[in-house]
Image: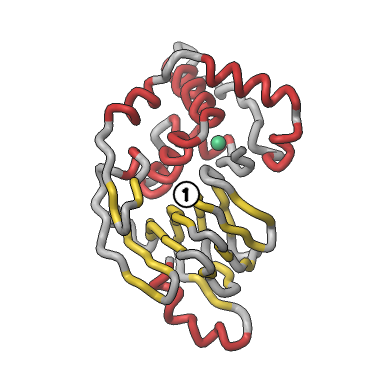
Amino acid sequence: MIKHHPTDDLLIAFSAGELSSSLSVVISTHIEMCPVCRHQVERYTAQMSDESLNQQPEVIDFAANSDDIGTDANFDEMLSGIIAEPESNFAETFKSTPSKVIGDGFELPKSLSRLNVSNFVNVGKISRARIELDEEPVRTSLLNIKAGGEVPHHTHKGFEITLLLQGKFEDELGGYVPGDFIILDAEHTHHPVSKEGCWCLTVVNDSIQFTKGVNRLLNPLGKFIY
Ligand SMILES: [Zn+2]
């Protein structure tokens, strides 16, 4: 089950159409994978188009303590309720979008399939392609870590968003499943490792800095990977 979700602030800004292209792309890919956040965005969108336009949308704070989300029995009940609802506009849109396969046969989420993707650059077990959104210095990328691959210990000068699309990886903070949405900032260092390999969508607004010993020699590679 997905444990890590965007904050409500991000979902509200997304619903209001206030996010930059890169953030919109990563949030819409998450809501393609996550029925809970899709439901939230639909509620916000409906509330915003209501007459009560000037009022704050009602906030149901699923994400504030998202690590607890899977332990609440009510959550399961709510989730079944959401899944049982009729197909949403978003779900219909995703269904009617043609799929696109890249790399060695990876099927892109529908929310990415209409975007231009650059060629892949390979560094060891990591391949990276840019999603061409033209938002420098913000960079949006597809990252493929092959089985047994890892990204050395690093921190970020700005923020780094990782949305796991397929496979699994883990870092100091735990393991992740497809759909998990992880935001890290300059306070965090981490060291993602993928035993079975994975595909991620990443958004960063500055270079990453490798932090440990000989890894520092890799710093010029930081821009390549992310
Ligand atoms: Zn979610």
Q: SS at mark 1?
A: strand
**Foreground of the two, 133 or 34:** 34
Q: Is residue 124 left or right of residue 182?
A: left
Say which amino acid is labelled 1: Gln
Quadrant in which residue 60 is drawn: top right
Quarter containing ligand 1? Answer: top right
Other residues around mark 1 within 10 Å, as few (<14) / some (14–19) / many (≥20):
some
Residue beneath the point at 24% across and 52% down: 116
- Dot 1 corresponds to which residue? 166
Q: Is residue 24 left or right of residue 97?
A: right
**Foreground of the two, 117 or 139:** 117
Instruction: Determine whether 38 is above or below 220 in the image.
Output: above
Q: Is residue 207 left or right of residue 95?
A: right
Residue beneath the point at 67% across and 40% down: 66
Q: How is the image coloured?
A: secondary structure
Image location of residue 208, percent across then percent down: 50, 71
Tally the numbered discs.
1
Residue beneath the point at 52% across and 28% down: 35
**Foreground of the two, 124 or 25:** 124
Instruction: Determine whether 158 is above or below 92 in the image.
Output: below
Residue beneath the point at 45% across and 11% down: 51
